[in-house]
Amino acid sequence: MMLHLRIKLKKKHPVCSELSNVLSTPILLQIRKIVFDKFNETNLRFTNDEIFEILKTQDIAKSLTIDDMKPFFDKLHQDRFLRPIAQNFTTQWFKLFGEVEKINCYSCNNEIHVGKLEERTCPSCKASI
Ligand SMILES: [Zn+2]
């Protein structure tokens, strides 16, 4: 009986827990790029829906739903890239912590997008920048 219950609980949110444990780096890098391209102003508000609309036109995000996005935004908040300012049902509004800069990482040679208040490490390879 106990065992049965435990298995049931484990299977409840498989996609959700998988995502929060191992966030896809390419998707995080894409969100950073979209914010840099479209919303790079510290007094601008933008939503998870606006970013998701752009993101889902790309191959890497085809299987994602808006509900899968939360861990990615949580991670970007933790990194001091953006911060949530309001929420209405599934729509979240964000603002930037600081202006986003486009940098070429010397270690991995990727074009990366880093906020002014973030730690100076590459979001792709973790090298100092
Ligand atoms: Zn790098």
Image: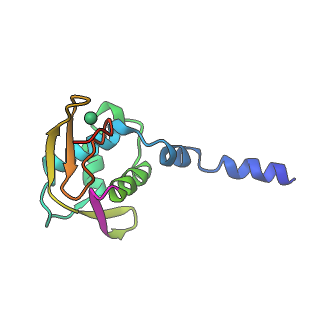
In the image, residue 60 lies at what x, y percent?
A: 34, 33
- Residue 36 locus on image (x, y percent): 16, 48
Quadrant containing ligand 1 = top left
Residue 121 included in the magenta stretch of the image: no
| Depth order, front residue of 109/88 | 109
Name the residue at 26% across, 63% down. 94
Q: Quadrant of the C terminus?
A: top left
Give residue 54's quadrant in the image: top left
The stretch of residues the image draws in magenta is: 79-85
Figure colour scheme: rainbow
Vertical position of residue 86 compared to residue 99: above or below: below
**Image quadrant in which you'd find residue 104:** top left
Q: Residue at x 53, y 43 (%)?
A: 18
In the picture as drawn, the residue positioned furthest to the right comes out as 1
Q: Position of residue 102 (x, y in %)?
A: 14, 43
Which residue occupies 81% across, 49% down?
A: 4
